[in-house]
Amino acid sequence: MYAMSGPYVLLAAIAVALLVAVNRDLISTFQFRLMMISTGVLALVWTIFLGSVWQEYR
């Protein structure tokens, strides 16, 4: 079960951390976008991977 929700928890944690960092001007906007896009892609790829594995073992 943790494997299914792991990337989404990571995405939420990074989103909160990055929002705090942006509000305090700790990082540039480019870094914020890069990290948000990469974590979103990671969550999407992980979902597709688990979906294909789940269908295979059904």
Image (cartoon, rainbow, N blue to C red):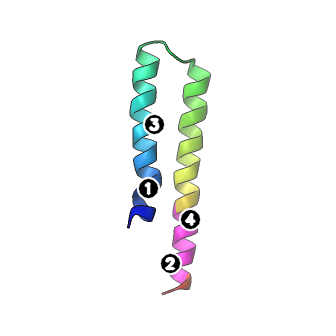
Residue type for callout 2: Trp
Residue 6 bears which disc, if any? Answer: 1
Q: Residue furthest bottom?
A: 58
Residue at 56% across / 84% down in the picture? Answer: 56
Q: Is residue 45 above or below residue 15?
A: below
Residue at 52% across / 69% down in the picture? Answer: 50
Magenta-span inclusion, residue 39? no
Residue type for callout 3: Ile
Q: Nearer the viewer, residue 49 or 26?
A: 26
- The residue beneath circle 3 is 14
Q: How many residues crowd mark 2 within 10 Å: few (<14), some (14–19), many (20+)?
A: few
Q: Which residues are magenta?
A: 47-55
> Disc 1 versus disc 2: distance between alpha carbons?
16 Å
**Whole-percent x, y for residue 23 in the image:** 41, 16
Residue at 38% across / 32% down in the picture? Answer: 16
Please, what secondary structure does the residue beneath circle 3 have? Answer: helix
Q: Are marks 1 and 4 in contact (CB under 8 Å)?
A: no
**Whole-percent x, y for residue 40 in the image:** 53, 46
Residue at 57% across / 51% down in the picture? Answer: 42
Q: Nearer the viewer, mark 1 or mark 2?
A: 1
Q: How many residues crowd mark 1 within 10 Å: few (<14), some (14–19), many (20+)?
A: few
- The residue beneath circle 4 is 48
If you read the primary sequence from the N terminus, does the residue marked by circle 2 or circle 3 appear first? 3
Q: Nearer the viewer, mark 1 or mark 4?
A: 1
If you read the primary sequence from the N terminus, does the residue marked by circle 3 or circle 4 appear first? 3
If you read the primary sequence from the N terminus, does the residue marked by circle 4 or circle 2 appear first? 4
Residue type for callout 1: Gly
Q: Secondary structure of the magenta portion, mostly?
A: helix
Residue type for callout 4: Ile
How many marks do you count on the picture? Answer: 4
- The residue beneath circle 2 is 54
**Whole-percent x, y for residue 8 in the image:** 43, 51
